[in-house]
Amino acid sequence: MSSTLDACFKSAETAANVSLQAGSFQIQYINIYFSFQKDLESRTKELELEESTISEQRERLEAQRAIEFYDELGSELASSISICPSRSLVVFFL
């Protein structure tokens, strides 16, 4: 009878160890999952910041190009305008 009890005890002990190991793997999995989740959130924030910066740079570049275009257009227009002093008349040569 003691050998049967010992066998049952060993079987229960083995099952408990397997259960503890499975629980340990589950905890490791959960920790890894949350670690990946945190990494993903931080990377998302980094990308949003980079995209915002790139967007601002693009807007500045477009504004700078527009300013340069209108400056050049204005200087060409100013050079094509001739003022007649005797009649105070503006004549455009386009």
Image: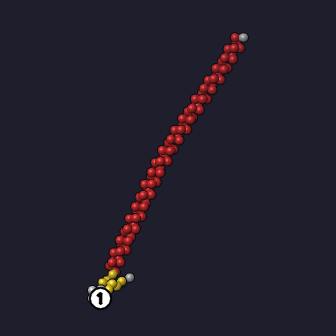
Q: In this view, does 92 lie above or below 55?
A: below
Seen as rendered, the residue at the extreme bottom is 86
Q: Is residue 79 left or right of residue 3?
A: left
Along the viewing direction, whichever of 23 and 3 lies nearer the viewer: 23
Seen as rendered, the residue at the extreme top is 2
Q: Count how many numbered circles sit on residues in the image.
A: 1
Q: Is residue 9 above or below residue 29?
A: above
Colouring: secondary structure
What residue appears at the point 66 percent right and 17 percent down from the top-left corner? 9
The quarter of the picture where residue 26 lies is top right
Which amino acid, mark 1?
Arg
**How packed is label 1: few (under 14 Cα within 10 Å), some, or many (20 or more)?**
few
Along the viewing direction, whichever of 90 and 60 lies nearer the viewer: 90
The quarter of the picture where residue 65 lies is bottom left
Residue 71: horizontal and vertical position, in percent? 35, 71
Please give the residue where the numbered disc 1 appears in the rendered image. 87
What residue appears at the point 69 percent right and 11 percent down from the top-left corner? 2
